[in-house]
Every structure is written in C-alpha cells, then in structure tokens.
Image (tube, helix red, strand yellow):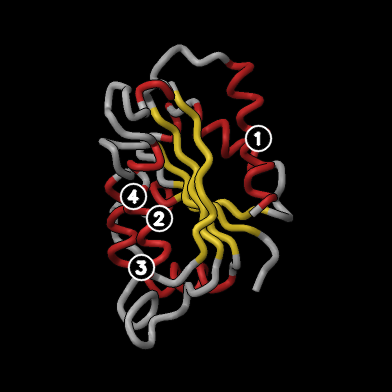
Amino acid sequence: MQNKKLVIVAHPSIKTSKVNKRWIEELNKYPDEIAVHELYSRYSNGEFDVKYEQAMLEKYDTIIFQFPIYWFNCPPLLKKWFDDVFTYGWAYGSSGNMLANKKIGFAVSAGSKEVDFSEKGRYSATLENVLLPFKLTTLYVKALYCSYFSFYGAEDEINFTHLESNAIEYIKFIKKI
C-alpha cells in the first residue's frame, strides 16, 4: 500500500471550474503525497477500464472523491464509475472486501451558500444530508468514512482570498485523514 493519498476528481467542465480547478492546482503541489486522477479527462467516452480502476484503488489506503454537487448528487460520470467499479465480489458481497478498512473522504463544491444547506434553509437539508448516500456507500463496502470537505457559494462571484485559504484548508483536511 502507498502512503500517498488518491484524489479522484469528477468535474464535467474542469476548465471553466473555479473551485475544483483551484483545488487541483493546490493538490498538484504535493506530488509525493497526493495522486490526482481525473475521470472526465481520462474517460471522456464514459467507458471505464474497470480492472485498471480497481487495481489503482487497491494501491491506496486513503481515497478522496472530489466533485461539484450536481443536482444534489455527484456528476453522472462519477455515479457510473461507482456502478461499474464497485463490483460484487470485489467491493462488496461475501468475498468483496477490497475496500475494507480503506479511508474514504469527500471534497465537494456547492453552488449555493452554506445557509441554503441547513434545516431552515432553501433546501431544508444540510450538505451532510445530501452526502448521506456516499457515506452509506463507503460503509457498505466496509471502508472507513472520513467525512467531507466543502466549499459553498461557488455560483456566486467567488472571493479569491476565500478560495485561496479554502484550498490550503483542503490540503490540511487530506493530510489529517
């Protein structure tokens, strides 16, 4: 197993992204500690090399999934990736334990403000509520859920200073896992 941590990025338009693109720039400053794997650039046709993806996951003890909240879920390619890669007999089932005890965390950008993601906010749900299926998936494959890191308000005119400090905090989040 590698001490290096794997960040799987799923952003359908990373070139126009502000938050996820900035996070990747920060991640790339730590090539000895963090490996970045971008799904949309590698699999633009949506067809995964499942054996490669599984072998890659087996190499790392810590995996972070980074993506924008997309219709209160992940982008469609990441959903397909989970469906295709987390297979019966490999990720779950009586003999599926390849992700058991791996640390899994999430890093998400939300277009709306944090106040919108509250019990009394616009969506009547917290970001933790929105991410519950990902937590449950992590637990289902016997991995260790390591919470999430977030950026709120990505649709607003981003305060670059806040994004800069957030990117540094993101690295701290990853290093703590």
Q: What residue type is disc 3 on?
A: Val
Front position in the image: 170 or 12: 170
- Rendering coords of residue 3 (x, y %): 70, 65
Which residue does the numbered mark 1 point to in the structure image? 169
Left or right: residue 59 compared with residue 91: right
Number of other residues with Cα within 10 Å of mark 1, as a class: few under 14, some 14 to 19, many 20 or more: some
In the structure shown, which secondary structural element does the residue marked by tag 2 occupy? Answer: helix
Which residue does the numbered mark 4 point to in the structure image? 44
Q: Is residue 46 above or below residue 165?
A: below
Residue at 61% in and 38% down: 170
Residue at 38% in and 87% down: 95
Residue at 57% in and 57% down: 6
Which label belongs to residue 85?
3
Q: In which quarter of the image is residue 11?
A: top left
In the structure shown, which secondary structural element does the residue marked by tag 3 occupy? Answer: helix
Quarter of the picture holding the C terminus: bottom right
| Marks 4 and 3 in Cβ contact (< 8 Å) | no
| Marks 4 and 2 in Cβ contact (< 8 Å) | no
Sequence-first tag of 4 and 3: 4
Left or right: residue 68 compared with residue 169: left
Which residue does the numbered mark 2 point to in the structure image? 135
Number of other residues with Cα within 10 Å of mark 2, as a class: few under 14, some 14 to 19, many 20 or more: many
- Rendering coords of residue 141 (x, y %): 40, 70
